[in-house]
Amino acid sequence: MKFFIDTANLAQIKEAQDLGVLDGVTTNPSLMAKEGITEHDNIMKHYVDICNIVDGDVSAEVIATDFDGMVKEGEALAELHEQIVVKLPMIKDGIKACKYFSERGIRTNVTLVFSPGQALLAAKAGATYVSPFIGRLDDISTDGLNLIAEIRHIYDNYDFKTQILAASVRHTMHVIDCAKLGADVMTGPLSSIEGLLKHPLTDSGLAQFLEDYKKGN
């Protein structure tokens, strides 16, 4: 399972990279705005800065909602750096743009996916990644993890190569559950990854080892 971090914060990205388990980054306009990154040139530079920190894929989202606009923005994003994956919304023109890019060897991430049918369309259009938002489904009393299971089942039926990128991961148990269900990638906050480190028996065991060492030295 690949670990992506969902942020535009360079310090957090570096911290995750230094941990040695980071495989990529996902971003969106909201995350950019949260870090105070505004205006086109600044946003484009920030994507390059992120690519210079991590070794893996960096999803950069288009703002346009029409086919021509998405193609124009997506081509500009892809030219920024070889690690860039063009992030497209799950709408009709987004699927058209996904097909356009896949035929030209430009990798894509179809985002804002909330149903198996949407995921099926993304795979048919040649998406590199599909991003089902499990946390947002949980927010409206719908089982987000069930969506991961349904997509996995469909993709395995037809040997689709599109990778399931579990998005809107909120906490560590989301990570564990997505791994059990066979998601190819998870993306979430740094806390969801660091939470995997924690167990009270690890803490108490280490404390006991150190205490016993002090007694004899």
Image (spheres, helix red, strand yellow):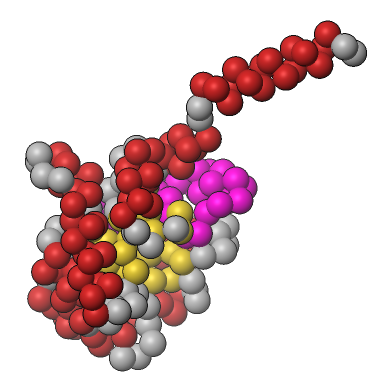
147 shown above or below 58? above
Direction from residue 151 to residue 9 in the image, left or right: right
What is the quadrant of residue 108 in the picture? bottom left
Q: Nearer the viewer, residue 164 or 189?
A: 164
In the rendered image, is residue 212 in sight?
Answer: yes
On the rendered image, what quadrant is the N terminus found in? Answer: bottom left
Indicate whether residue 211 is drawn in magenta: no
| Percent x, y of residue 2 | 45, 59
Could you tell me which residue is drawn at 15 percent across and 39 percent down? 139
Q: Nearer the viewer, residue 136 or 43?
A: 136
The residue segment tinted magenta is 4-31
In the rendered image, is residue 62 in sight?
Answer: no
| Percent x, y of residue 61 | 30, 65
| Percent x, y of residue 93 | 13, 78
Could you tell me which residue is drawn at 35 percent across and 90 percent down? 104
215 shown above or below 99? above
